[in-house]
Amino acid sequence: MKRENRKVAVSLFIAFLLVTGSASAQFVSGRVANEQGEPLAGANVYWLGSTNAVQTQSNGQFQISTEGVSDMHLIASYVGHIPDTFEITGPVFLVFNLQPSKALDEVVVSGQRDGVIISDLSPIKTEQITQTELGKAACCDLAGCFETQSTVQPQTTNVITNSKELRILGLSGVYNQVLVDGFPVIQGLTYTYGISTIPGTLVDNIYVAKGANSVLQGYESISGQINVETKEPDNTDNLYVNAFVNSFAEKHLNANYAFRKNKWSNLTAFHMIQPADKVDQDDDHFLDLPQLTRYMIFNKWKYGNEQELGWSSRIGLRFVNEQRVGGQTSFDAKTDQGSSSVYGQTVNFNQPELWTKTGYRINARHNIVFFASTFYQDQHSYFGTVKYDAQQTNFYGNIQHEFNYGSHNLKSGISYRHLNLNEDIAFTENSLNRTYAGNYHRIENIPGVFAENTLRLFNDKVTWIAGVRGDQHNDFGFMFTPRTLIKYDLAPKTIVRANIGTGWRTVNLFSENIGLLVSSRDIIFAEALEPEKAINYGINLTQKFETENAMFSGFLSVDYYHTSFQNQIFPDYDSDPTKAIIRNFTGTSVSDGFQAEVYVKIWERFEVKTGYTYLDVYREVGETKELLPFNPKSKILTTFGYAPLSNKFHFDMNMHWYGEQRLPDTKSNPEEFQRPDYSDPYTVVSAQLTYTFGALEVYGGCENIFDFRQLQPIISWQDPFSPYFDTSSVWGPTKGREFYLGVRYKL
């Protein structure tokens, strides 16, 4: 039955891609921005004397049909701005730069940007998290940028390393694709610590989409895609400085400097973290969080404008150096590294990166874009008596051609990926008789070809995307990835979206599961690992609303997504508490996710958002349904915000409630090392107050106000060199209440 359904789905993809010219209407495309060039999402674009109208997307872009239009004057309008008009005489990409209305109080205009935007036009249900939303929390790094979001759950994977992942649909972060400026840089060695190395002060917008979506940038996005857009040199503050300190004495400093000259612009950013004090609140003689030192330098050049005819380019460079020291409070990295008497962790890595996105817009119908990126990471680590040295070289290339014809937008191209990952594992002492020491070397070369067509029908009420890609893996052969998405406008503010598609990925076991090296478990490879494959489908309903007097506005969003794996690989912690058994899983492995979210803005001053998430993530072993560990079945997020129209200050609060989670089976451990089958439900409440003094912002807050902590999360903390020592059983916060204070300066 599953095979037949897949054949039907593939047939539909192919049939759709063969459709050409089913609608003969012509279209005009363009972009609406303010006088600074910032995109205006939700601006109205319409023909003079016609009811034919559209709204701009989150990036300010639009596409409007000319069908039935006699007067070729196109108007763009936006609240607080003077409308502008173009007379259309031929194919051209329009750019509206709307001027602010002098009749309105400028203060009122400045406070209207929403923190989260769901585009009415995008066929993919995409949540845009703006700088407004990012400013509601400390947002020190990318993992901290989702404190006010229901869709993405930052999850600590190991208490010793304090490494984090971003989960969507209850699935591990390896199943979503994280892009930075359109490039896949979070993979392999960069997976464990990569999201922490992107400072929140460098982020302009974050775009989050659930489920299988576009094939343009790859095949991995099984549970979703997170696209991080860094600040543009020509559309950001000339100078931005952020300084931050928390109650653990961890210090952050960020500085951005931008300049512009003619068609060139440049952004240089510096990021630094200095380590916290040694903190052990639960008296288990282990640090509650590692001492972290990080230095990052980022440089981004921009030439031209990709929306205008001719050449445009972005070139980026980044370098990261990071050190983490953790383990027992008595551990001294200089003398105890690799010791069997004091347990300690040390991580040191360097990572240079280089990337470019260069394009040439030939005319209104044709555009060519070239993506290329490369990075190298050199990592040296000790986890107790485990020595881990690893190097990774990555290259990514992608050439896309965009062709607009009639009601179609076709993007096609070729891609190439190269990964060279070399991991050396040794033991300074091996009283536990662990067997997995050795050299693990993987080389991947993956050329690919792809095509994705967007078709707009019935006066833009229906938008249909169909995409396919084929990739040739040097070890696993040819992989076919079809996907399709459809959007239907039931009413002007009521939208239904649906999608279905496949995805696959290869496994980088140690780099993606670094917690295996931290514990005393022996790692057993039962067989050679095959690629993980999955099919995902989902449906979403978005209802926007606004009263006539603008007292209330907001949206309701409800969605359901189903993911079924053919071969999901995850360490088996249950069969033997002293081992992690790695094998292909040929049975059924499923994630069912339901989410309902309501957002209301009242009098442009108050914001309230509540989201409920239900997750059923399991595998079937014979006749038994086994829930996968560390997934709360139910979660509730509620946020509250207040800001006066003067925008002199704003107060923000969020509350996370997590239901019980299944924990790994420890019944075969000695009694003192056994843990319950399920965690307790818990609630975390955080709040922040931000006050503005001209170009200076002062903010302070408290995370985990009521100081909930998972006490003594480490199994066998009394003897870290016993066979039962395990640091992976993390289901809640471990560092407790955190106060912080920071300042931002913008010029």
Image: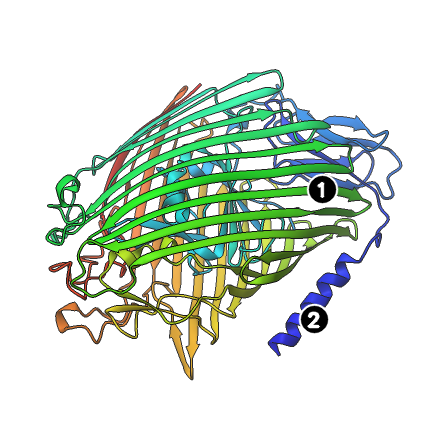
Q: Residue at x 61, y 61 (%)?
A: 479
Give how far across and how far down residue 589 sits, in percent.
47, 71
Disc 1: CA contacts within 10 A as few (<14), some (14-19) or many (>=20): some
Q: Is residue 574 above or below residue 603?
A: below
Residue farthest bottom in this picture:
623
Residue farthest right in this picture:
70
Q: Secondary structure at mark 2?
A: helix
For the residue pair 280 and 3, the one nearer the viewer reads as 3
Horizontal relation, residue 681 to residue 618: left or right: left
Residue farthest top in this picture:
261
Give how far across and how far down residue 294 sits, in percent.
31, 35
Give how far across and how far down residue 278 sits, in percent.
16, 41
Return the mark for residue 8: 2
Q: Is residue 377 above or below residue 563?
A: above
Whether residue 228 appears in this view of the structure is: yes
Horizontal relation, residue 397 to residue 614: left or right: right
Q: What kind of residue is marked 1?
A: His
Label 2, label 1: how far apart the Cα atoms are: 29 Å
Q: Residue 277 appears in which quarter of the rendering?
A: top left
Q: Residue at x 69, y 71 (%)?
A: 8
Horizontal relation, residue 208 to residue 650: left or right: right
Give how far across and how far down residue 389 sits, in percent.
31, 48
Q: Residue at x 18, y 47 (%)?
A: 287
Disc 2: CA contacts within 10 A as few (<14), some (14-19) or many (>=20): few
Return the mark for residue 401: 1
For the residue pair 730 and 129, the one nearer the viewer reads as 730
Q: Which one is earlier in the sequence, the residue at label 2 or at label 1?
A: 2
Whether residue 147 appears in this view of the structure is: no
